[in-house]
Image (cartoon, coloured by chain):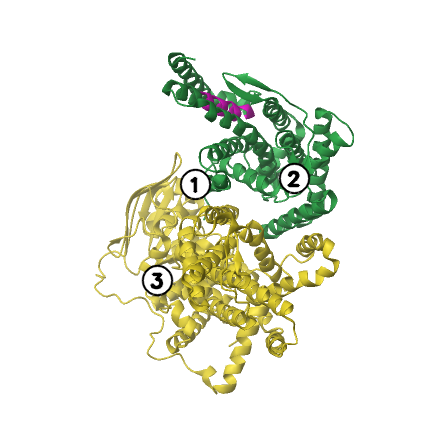
């Protein structure tokens, strides 16, 4: 590819991105593409940098390769982050056990594939179902009785549930890592960048799940109830909404998405272990905060930012600094705009 | 000294149990009855006590949720480790250095993050805790991921015990002094604390730094006990361990923290019997405790704080006869307004010029002009939403005005933080009462003497005579104020248990304790019956004369306003529609149309 062509393509991508930004309101408000906005933006930004690097004559392959890897990692973070953000929206709880639900999903998927000989899609469904049930159980047993207690009590309970799931996992699944059978091999060559099929699958499945979530939250009755509860629980109750059911549904949906993330991570990074949920859980939570906690598109945005930047840090600096990037971003965001990138400013009434 | 009823329960028992346990343990260790394994476990207990009490200072006493304590422990551990390995410094030096290093890191991290609240603060501390660990993991001097090997090995129960006891005593002294009252006030209601003249940011950072510093001390002990440390010793899980101990003991209870640190450090040793399921039982226990006893295993804070202080009081009265009945030291001035040095009494006490504030696109108050003469009783009235409380918020610094100037005693105060405004001599009450609900009536008022305490953490720690005298003066002045507001019989009641009218009076008492020259009352008669309102009117006149005050009040009770106030400003939609005497206000057609209605005219 000549530099001139690259420059032209760069202009094109920038124009496309500007167009997307200009019609952001339209895209985000009422089309089915609401939650695809951020993945799409991320893709365009990466393409732009790619063409820029080509135009400058620099080594672009490495960058794009890493960035594309970042997108699939970001998809996983985003899927987990959605659960955090939805639960926080509804009951204002940082559900520390959520990362472990993702672990449960990964194991459910693993056994569905290895023991039940299921193929990818049914295994994904099984994993989502098992995670949803686990999530709802955790809510019913540990959180529901404490719904009116101080937030700290609930937070500690969540931490307790997280430790419990992890250690139960150690007992049930043993601490020996399991390895997912490879389901998607092969890779495609796009503009000289080789992209693994598994990573494409991760990205595509994530987008599909986002669209499904978008439909659920926007157009269905339980979705509407969920939004109502997250705005004002008491008012929603007075409107005849069954709060318990809505909260359970929120946990079910959020946990199912985490379960899906567990399977998706298994096809890219096949080793799974009972403690696999701790770090991704924390980082996904950070992603939710960066995007603006309680805001669903924010979780997407935060997940993509963390996924891509983590991969770039690993590639350009050192993998030992990788864990600092999410938390570094977190601090910057919190200090600059504590309610997150998409969050709204609130003021305490005196 | 009288105590809240809760505070007396079980005092002697706790002290006795603690003392006996300590003596027994020391004898056992000294005589070698415990083998080295158990002595070593006791070392862990000591370290955990320091970690727990120090985190409790931040989370329980000050109410700032921090979940990154392991990071500060790591700073201390590595400071001590590096000193020990490269400079062969003795343990004492290492501990002090760890204290200082962790304190400095605590201030550096606390300054930016403590602006955040609740969950956001928790996440930020979590983030910093992780970043500290990653940084340590990537530095050469800290040995990277492998850590430090070959730190001088000191696993001596007595050293750890002494350091733990000293740490606990220091934290306990801080909590039970005026700075400690300020910290509790911040936990109870940050905005109210700020208007009591407490520089909440400074105090939060102080608490955070002290808590971090002691975590650093614990880290130093840990490093020497292990002789080998690596970044994986200080993960998020370590922070959670400490947090769990604090919460199980009861947030805000130092003795609770100690007891839970002891039990939770020993519990795993007993659970070793069923070792295989230990890690499952531990979190299960945590969840069960939260479900059935969310306030912590050992209940509320009063039991324990009161216990120690009451026992000490009793101990003191055994040795120092009659001291309890001393009159307030005569060289300290009785409560009065500030000296009016160089203040021109003819000049208006408060002058507001062109004051405006915007909330987004909404102009909540626009171009307000108001002048208050010294000693005036001025009313601010208007329909709901007219911007009256917003005016108070701007004067007291809670909402910086978008435009305009506020002059108090001839000096600009707009843009100053609320605590500085209070220090200048303006006090207020709140429309939606903001008392420190879980403190006693007396403690509410004592907290408000913050600005006149005049002693530092140092003299509180050393228990100097000036500290004792000052505390006694504050106590007697607070009681005098309660008497003036006819609340003396309620002094040991929790503020939340008072009826509405009394809560409003307590807010006035608390405001007076900051020794203001201008008092802002926001709907003082709201929720009062006619008799109470009549009493309130007398009270307001009385305190104005007695304390030489200027009073600006917001009120919807027109009979009160018209009888009490000498001048009235009427607001509507953020604009001044009239200012004048009550009679002029009653006759003004615009006021009648906007607010009073025909009948009142």
Residue A174 against residue B35 in the figure, above or below:
above
State which chain disc 1 sits on: A
Residue A174 seen anywhere in this rendered image of the structure:
yes
Q: Which residues are magenta?
A: A35-47
Q: Secondary structure at mark 1?
A: helix
Q: Measure how far apart labels 3 and 1 are at the Cα level.
A: 40 Å
Q: Look at mark 2 in the image and give the residue it sits on.
A: A237
Q: Earlier in the sequence, mark 1 or mark 2?
A: 2
- The residue identified by callout 3 is B516
Disc 2: which chain? A
Q: Are marks 3 and 1 on the same chain?
A: no
Q: Tell me if mark 3 has few (under 14), some (14-19) or many (20+) residues whose alpha carbon lies within 10 angstroms of its own.
A: many
Q: Is residue B459 above or below residue A340?
A: below
Instruction: Give the chain coloured green.
Output: A
Q: Are marks 3 and 1 in contact (CB under 8 Å)?
A: no
Q: Estimate the x, y position of residue B368 in percent, counting from the top left.
A: 31, 44
Q: Which mark is residue A332?
A: 1
Q: Which chain is yellow?
A: B
* Residue at the image point whose x is 56% and y is 40% from the top: A285
């Amino acid at each position: 590819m000549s530099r001139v062509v690259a420059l032209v393509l760069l202009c094109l991508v920038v124009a496309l991105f500007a167009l997307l930004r200009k019609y952001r309101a339209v895209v985000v408000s009422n089309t089915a593409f609401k939650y695809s906005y951020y993945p799409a933006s991320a893709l365009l930004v990466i393409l732009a940098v790619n063409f820029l690097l080509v135009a400058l004559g620099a080594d672009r392959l490495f960058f794009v390769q890493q960035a594309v890897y970042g997108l699939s990692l970001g998809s996983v973070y985003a899927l987990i982050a959605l659960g955090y953000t939805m639960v926080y929206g509804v009951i204002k709880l940082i559900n520390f056990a959520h990362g472990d639900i993702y672990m449960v999903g990964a194991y459910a998927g693993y056994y569905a594939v290895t023991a039940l000989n299921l193929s990818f899609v049914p295994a994904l469904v099984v994993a989502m179902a098992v995670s949803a049930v686990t999530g709802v159980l955790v809510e019913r047993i540990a959180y529901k009785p404490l719904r009116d207690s101080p937030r700290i009590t609930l937070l500690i309970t969540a931490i307790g549930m997280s430790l419990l799931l992890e250690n139960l996992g150690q007992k049930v699944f043993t601490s020996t890592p399991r390895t997912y059978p490879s389901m998607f091999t092969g890779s495609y060559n796009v503009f000289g960048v080789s992209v693994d099929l598994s990573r494409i699958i991760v990205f595509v499945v994530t987008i599909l799940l986002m669209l499904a979530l978008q439909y659920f939250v926007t157009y269905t009755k339980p979705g509407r109830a969920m939004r109502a509860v997250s705005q004002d629980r008491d008012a929603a109750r007075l409107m005849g909404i069954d709060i318990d059911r809505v909260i359970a549904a929120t946990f079910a949906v959020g946990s199912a998405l985490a379960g899906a993330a567990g399977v998706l991570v298994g096809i890219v990074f096949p080793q799974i272990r009972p403690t696999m949920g701790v770090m991704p859980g924390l980082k996904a939570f950070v992603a939710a905060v960066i995007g603006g906690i309680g805001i669903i598109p924010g979780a997407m945005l935060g997940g993509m930012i963390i996924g891509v930047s983590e991969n770039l840090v690993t590639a350009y600096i050192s993998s030992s600094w990788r864990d600092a990037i999410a938390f570094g971003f977190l601090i910057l965001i919190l200090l600059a705009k504590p309610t997150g990138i998409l969050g709204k400013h609130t003021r305490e009434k005196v | 000294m009288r105590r809240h009823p809760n505070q007396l329960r079980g005092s002697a028992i706790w002290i006795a149990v603690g003392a006996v346990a300590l003596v027994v343990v020391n004898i056992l260790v000294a005589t070698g009855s415990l083998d080295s394994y158990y002595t070593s476990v006791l070392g862990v207990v000591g370290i955990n006590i320091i970690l727990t009490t120090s985190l409790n200072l931040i989370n329980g006493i000050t109410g700032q949720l921090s979940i990154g304590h392991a990071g500060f422990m790591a700073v201390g551990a590595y400071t001590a480790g590096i000193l020990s390995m490269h400079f062969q410094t003795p343990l004492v030096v290492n501990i002090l250095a760890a204290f200082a290093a962790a304190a400095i890191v605590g201030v550096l991290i606390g300054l930016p993050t403590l602006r955040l609240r609740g969950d956001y603060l928790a996440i930020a501390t979590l983030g910093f805790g992780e970043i500290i660990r990653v940084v340590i993991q990537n530095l050469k001097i800290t040995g990277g991921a492998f850590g430090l090997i070959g730190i001088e090995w000191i696993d001596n129960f007595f050293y750890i015990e002494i350091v733990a006891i000293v740490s606990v005593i220091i934290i306990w002294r801080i909590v039970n002094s005026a700075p400690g009252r300020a910290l509790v006030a911040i936990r109870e209601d940050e905005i109210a604390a700020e208007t009591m003249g407490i520089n909440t940011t400074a105090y939060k950072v102080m608490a955070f730094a002290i808590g971090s510093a002691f975590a650093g001390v614990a880290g130093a002990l840990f490093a020497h006990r292990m002789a080998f440390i690596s970044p994986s010793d200080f993960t998020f899980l370590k922070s959670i361990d400490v947090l769990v101990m604090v919460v199980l003991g009861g947030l805000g209870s130092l003795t609770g923290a100690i007891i839970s640190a002891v039990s939770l450090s020993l519990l795993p040793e007993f659970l070793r019997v069923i070792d295989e399921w230990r890690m499952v039982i531990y979190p299960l226990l945590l969840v069960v405790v939260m479900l059935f006893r969310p306030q912590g295993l050992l209940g509320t804070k009063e039991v324990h704080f009161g216990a120690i202080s009451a026992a000490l009081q009793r101990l003191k009265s055994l040795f120092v006869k009659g001291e309890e009945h001393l009159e307030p030291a005569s060289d300290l001035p009785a409560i009065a307004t500030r000296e009016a040095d160089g203040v021109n009494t003819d000049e208006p006490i408060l002058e507001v010029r062109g004051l405006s504030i915007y909330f987004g696109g909404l102009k909540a108050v626009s171009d307000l002009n108001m002048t208050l003469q010294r000693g005036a009783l001025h009313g601010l009235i208007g329909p709901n939403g007219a911007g009256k409380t917003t005016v108070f918020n701007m004067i007291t610094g809670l909402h910086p005005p978008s435009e305009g100037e506020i002059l108090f005693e001839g000096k600009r105060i707009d843009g100053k933080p609320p605590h500085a405004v209070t220090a200048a001599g303006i006090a207020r009450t709140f429309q939606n009462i903001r008392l420190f609900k879980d403190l006693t009536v007396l403690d509410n008022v004592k907290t408000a003497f913050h600005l006149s305490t005049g002693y530092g953490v140092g003299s509180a720690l050393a228990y100097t005579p000036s500290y004792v005298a000052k505390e006694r003066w504050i106590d007697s002045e607070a009681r005098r104020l309660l008497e003036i507001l006819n609340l003396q019989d309620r002094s040991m009641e929790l503020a939340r248990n008072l009826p509405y009218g009394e809560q409003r009076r307590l807010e006035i008492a608390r405001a007076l304790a900051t020794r203001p020259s201008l008092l802002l009352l926001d709907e003082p008669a709201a929720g009062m019956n006619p008799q109470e309102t009549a009493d309130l009117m007398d009270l307001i006149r009385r305190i104005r004369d007695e304390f030489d005050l200027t009073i600006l009040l917001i009120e919807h009770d027109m009979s009160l306003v018209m009888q009490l106030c000498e001048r009235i400003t009427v607001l509507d939609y953020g604009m001044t529609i009239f200012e004048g005497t009550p009679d002029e206000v009653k006759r003004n057609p615009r006021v009648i149309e906007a607010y009073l209605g025909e009948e009142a005219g």
